[in-house]
Image (cartoon, helix red, strand yellow):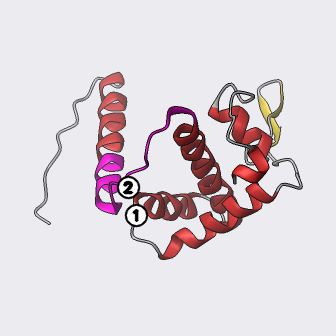
Amino acid sequence: MTSETRTDMSRFPTAGHFASWLGLCPGTKITRGKVMSGKIKRVANRAAQALRLAAAALRSSQSALDAYFHRMCGRMDKPKAVIAAAHKLARLIYTMLTKGEKYTDQGQDYYEERYRERVLRQLAQRAEKMGMKLIVNEQPA
């Protein structure tokens, strides 16, 4: 990865710029509020290819990234889910290289619980906008 990008990440102001340079961001061809195309740009970049391979290999791990990949597979076809997971990996790598932080995987259960909490919070907000109140009925596991 560092042979392609070097260790100096200052030329990329944000993680989004880094992911775009890798060619892992969707296009934004929008006219009059309608999305015309969301294709990613084609780049000849070994780092992006390595990230896509790593993202495709996530399906057999028991990590939070695996849970993210499987959730994306449920929402879109597999090649797009691989790109989405590779984009997430690129953002993680950017953060690790710029801030010097280590990545600690919280695990699949942690990710699923956070996702559940996020969905419940969004449902409660939607119910409140409609003048209703969401009551969560906890089911024993």
Pointers 1 and 2 in contact (C-beta within 8 Å)? yes
In the visual, does 15 lie left or right of 47?
Answer: left
Seen from the viewer's position, the closer of residues 35 and 83 is: 83
Amino acid at dot 2: Asp
At 43% from the left edge and 49% from the top edge, which residue is drawn?
103
Q: Is residue 113 magenta?
A: yes
Disc ID at residue 34: none
Question: Closer to us: mark 1 or mark 2?
Answer: 2
> What residue occupies the far bottom of the structure in this picture?
60
Above or below, 20 relative to 45: above
In the visual, does 72 lie left or right of 132?
Answer: right
Which percent across, then down, holds residue 134? Answer: 22, 36
At 32% from the left edge and 46% from the top edge, which residue is drawn?
114
Boundaries of the magenta span: 98-116
At 82% from the left edge and 48% from the top edge, which residue is drawn?
39
Q: Which residue is mark 1?
A: 63
In the visual, does 7 lie left or right of 36?
Answer: left
Seen from the viewer's position, the closer of residues 19 and 25 is: 19
Of the two numbered discs 1 and 2 on the same chain, state the one appearing first in sequence.
Answer: 1
Q: Which residue is mark 2?
A: 105
Which percent across, then down, holds residue 139? Answer: 13, 59
Which percent across, then down, holds residue 74? Answer: 53, 63
Amino acid at dot 1: Ser
Where is residue 95, by image quadrant?
top right
Where is residue 125, by image quadrant?
top left
Check disc 1 and report its element: helix, strand or loop.
loop
Quadrant, the C terminus: bottom left
Check disc 2 and report its element: helix, strand or loop.
loop
Q: Is residue 138 magenta?
A: no
C-alpha distance separating marks 1 and 2: 7 Å
Q: Sort mark 2 into few (<14), some (14-19) or many (20+) by Cα contacts within 10 Å.
A: few
Which percent across, then down, holds residue 130? Answer: 35, 25
